[in-house]
Image (tube, coloured by chain):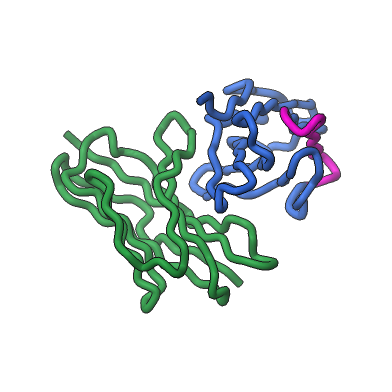
Chain colours: A blue, B green
Amino acid sequence: EAGVAQSPRYKIIEKRQSVAFWCNPISGHATLYWYQQILGQGPKLLIQFQNNGVVDDSQLPKDRFSAERLKGVDSTLKIQPAKLEDSAVYLCASSPLRSKNIQYFGAGTRLSVL
Amino acid sequence: AQKVTQAQTEISVVEKEDVTLDCVYETRDTTYYLFWYKQPPSGELVFLIRRNSFDEQNEISGRYSWNFQKSTSSFNFTITASQVVDSAVYFCALIGSGNNRKLIWGLGTSLAVNP
């Protein structure tokens, strides 16, 4: 079974530029999560989708971050414009509805904002 | 409020030593789940174990074992006969019930296993 796919693996941009990350969850997984992980910390949930609806986006900085999950499969996370403090690893995870909360993670995208 | 504490920031051991990673949690929920994830240098978080609050049986999987004690709100993880490939950051996490259904993560313990 293929795991969670994310691209790109690395991205370097200058502040005020825009960037987008892509995630393809495990086939059949209804729930998709985007996390931000700053070096030395645990992951912080940015947004949770169930199918193509948003379940929780309380910690998403909506003035600059946006995410969508069209058709309930792939998802993109966008930052516009980026700030220096957005430098982090962005992790995507997915879980099936009956997984009892087990989340399966992709390898992440490491973003450096200069 | 829910909280997960991993007091050990970094641990360094020599190969074949046993090592225990501590995890202490706080929650008022009676139903909750505890997790351990491994994050190797490649960056991907790898699921290791889930334990629900009603199952206090300890679990062993190869060289890995977990000790869940509700009386002390702890869910400790032991690696027996550590190997270099065990070098990673290990995260303990908690998810509650009702309005607390969001994974709460500890800060992680960085384990270095030296040859």
Query: Quadrant of residue A4 in the image?
Result: top right
The magenta region covers A61-74
Comparing A80 with B74, the one in front is: B74
Name the quadrant of the C terminus of chain B. top left
Query: Quadrant of residue A66 in the image?
Result: top right
Q: Is residue A73 magenta?
A: yes
Q: What residue do we see at 40% from left, 35% from top?
A: B40
Name the quadrant of the N terminus of chain B. bottom right
Query: Quadrant of residue A78 in the image?
Result: top right
**Spot occupied by residue B101 in the image (x, y as percentages of width and height):** 64, 60
- Can you say whether B3 is above or below A96 in the image? below
- Can you say whether B49 is above or below A68 in the image? below
Q: What residue do we see at 80% from left, 38% from top?
A: A52
Question: Quick check: B16 left or right of B105?
Answer: left
Q: Is residue B75 visible?
A: yes
Q: Is residue A112 visible?
A: no
In the current view of this chain or complex, which residue is farthest to the right?
A63
- Can you say whether A92 is above or below B49 in the image? above
Comparing B76 with B29, the one in front is: B29
**Spot occupied by residue A69 in the image (x, y as percentages of width and height):** 78, 33
**Spot occupied by residue B83 in the image (x, y as percentages of width and height):** 21, 37
Question: Quick check: B112 left or right of A82?
Answer: left
